[in-house]
């Protein structure tokens, strides 16, 4: 990625000098891992194997003090700083060449307040961590659909999931955060104190600091009716899905998936690897309505296979984990749309038939209900007038395979563009879409730039979909 003019220039250091190494190690309570150390090869990896980079140091932070030390060190030495939570950023922003990687993965403490229905979670937590802790009290908040995703990156990008229609986005449920800003300050932002910083991190990406902890509003979500139902790749199924979302209560969370049949026992073998579409359900309404939900799903089309049943809410967030482990090669793009126009559905069917692998897919997230009850300027996440967000992903087991599939993703995105909003969801974008940042934030972009100038005038936090000062 080309550095912005305000970014520090010493970004290609391959190793630290002995003096700088000692300085960093002396200031950190956790681990500092450098080239040549036994854990270095593992420590430099991120979820998306497309990004094979070699940082000068990886700091595995033990606490907020380590975050401050790493931020200060990178700023003072004019080194690139990459911040890593769950490391799922498809654009590879959790690593860098020649700079400092601040790895929060060991900061995973969580405290649930069941009476207040809140959670405070450290910045290295994954959604598996938070879902497990909250479910012990029958509570949950909107999270992602792969359990190893980090809470910080998903939330600061907006945060979609199965509960979006009922509970809003993850960022809508963020009520406070402890943020280490570019000058090393530790700021606890709430609606009452430093509210402008809380506004910015609720959708503004990683542009404003490192989130040492995040506090969420929780909702009563005990067991749910969840799982996938697969159908032939038929535009009529998708049109009926569109109608199902439009007239279903907000407790009905359901993602539309278009791709190749997975090798699962509940799907007949003749459909493994063949184009199809599916609906992944998360019904968090009353159990006595389960049969009605099952009937509505059956009405969408000829059911090829189904795995649908009562399960703890955290389980639905693990259903794709085995299919999508760390170490695969990914390339993504995203779109927003108002409704699901017939022309877009035809593109889903046409391009879906050529999905490059079983692991890759087109996934459509509904964004109505509670998402649209938040104003477009109430958080940094600006798109409150769209109904769906689509992720287009090529996911392959080799670098060459992924590079060969990039054209499919780009052509697919181009086919959807006439039926899509100008901007899209930042967490669905690869690093080649920096030019879309103003459109992604729309009317909020100018305010975000102003806050960036206040909190990070030197653009230390630039490994993201960058809001330039």
Image (cartoon, rainbow, N blue to C red):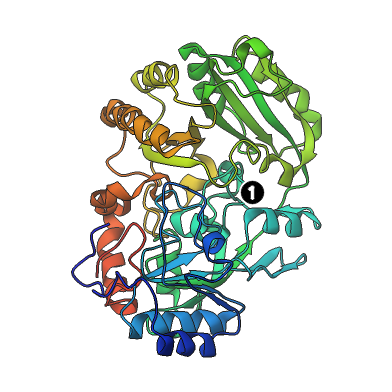
Question: What residue lies at 71% left-to-right and 63% top-to-bottom?
Answer: 117
Q: Compared to 111, does 398 lie above or below?
A: above
Taking the view exactly as shown, the residue that stands out farthest to the left is 5
Figure quadrant of residue 223: top right
Q: Is residue 317 visible?
A: yes
The answer to whether 110 is drawn above or below residue 232 in the figure is below
Please provide percent x and percent y for residue 211.
51, 71
* Residue 187 visible somewhere in the drawing: no
Asked whether, in this view, residue 380 is left or right of residue 469, the answer is: right
Q: Residues within 10 Å of mark 1 (few under 14, many from 20)?
A: many
Relative image position of residue 62 (x, y in whole percent): 62, 78
Which quarter of the rendered picture does the N terminus lie within?
bottom left
Which residue occupies the foreground of this view, 58 or 15?
15
What percent of the width, then of the height, locates residue 348?
41, 22
Quadrant where the C terminus is found in the figure: bottom left
Q: Which residue is mark 1?
A: 147
- Left or right relative to 162: residue 411: left
Q: Position of residue 324 (x, y in %)?
A: 58, 39
């Amino acid at each position: 990625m080309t550095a912005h003019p305000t970014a520090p220039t010493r970004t290609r250091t391959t190793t630290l000098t002995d003096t700088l190494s000692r300085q960093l190690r002396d200031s950190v309570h956790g681990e500092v891992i450098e080239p040549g150390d036994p854990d270095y090869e593992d420590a430099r990896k991120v979820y998306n194997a497309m990004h094979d980079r070699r940082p000068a140091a990886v700091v595995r932070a033990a606490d907020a003090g380590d975050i401050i030390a790493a931020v200060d060190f990178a700023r003072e030495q004019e080194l690139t700083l990459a911040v890593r939570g769950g490391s799922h950023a498809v654009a590879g922003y959790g690593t860098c060449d020649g700079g400092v990687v601040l790895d929060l993965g060991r900061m995973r403490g969580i405290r649930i307040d069941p009476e207040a229905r809140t959670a405070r979670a450290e910045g290295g937590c994954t959604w598996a961590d938070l879902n497990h802790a909250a479910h012990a009290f029958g509570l949950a908040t909107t999270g992602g659909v792969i359990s190893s995703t980090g809470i910080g990156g998903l939330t600061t990008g907006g945060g979609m999931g199965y509960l979006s229609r009922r509970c809003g986005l993850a960022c809508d449920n963020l009520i406070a955060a402890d943020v280490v800003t570019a000058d090393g300050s530790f700021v606890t932002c709430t609606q009452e104190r430093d509210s402008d910083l809380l506004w910015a991190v609720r959708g503004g990406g990683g542009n404003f600091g490192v989130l040492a902890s995040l506090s969420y509003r929780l909702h009563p979500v005990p067991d749910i009716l969840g799982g996938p139902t697969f159908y032939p790749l038929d535009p009529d199924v998708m049109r009926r899905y569109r109608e199902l979302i439009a007239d279903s209560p907000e407790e009905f969370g359901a993602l539309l998936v278009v791709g190749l049949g997975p090798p699962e026992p509940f799907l007949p073998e003749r459909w493994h690897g063949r184009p199809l579409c599916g609906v992944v359900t998360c019904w968090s309404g009353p159990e006595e309505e389960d049969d009605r939900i099952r009937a509505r799903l059956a009405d969408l089309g000829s059911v090829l296979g189904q795995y649908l049943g009562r399960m703890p809410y955290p389980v639905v967030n693990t259903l794709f984990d085995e299919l999508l482990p760390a170490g695969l090669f990914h390339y993504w793009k995203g779109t927003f749309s108002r409704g699901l126009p017939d022309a877009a559905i035809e593109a889903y069917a046409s391009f879906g038939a050529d999905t490059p692998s079983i692991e890759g897919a087109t996934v459509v997230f509904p964004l109505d209900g509670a998402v649209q009850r938040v104003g477009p300027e109430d958080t940094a996440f600006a798109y409150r007038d769209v109904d769906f967000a689509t992720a287009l992903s090529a996911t392959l087991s080799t670098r060459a395979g992924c590079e060969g599939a990039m054209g499919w993703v780009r052509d697919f995105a181009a086919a959807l563009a006439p039926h899509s909003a100008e901007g899209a969801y930042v967490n669905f974008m690869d690093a080649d879409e920096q030019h879309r940042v103003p459109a992604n934030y729309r009317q909020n972009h100018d305010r975000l730039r102003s806050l960036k100038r206040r909190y990070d005038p030197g653009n230390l936090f630039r490994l993201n979909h960058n809001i330039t000062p």
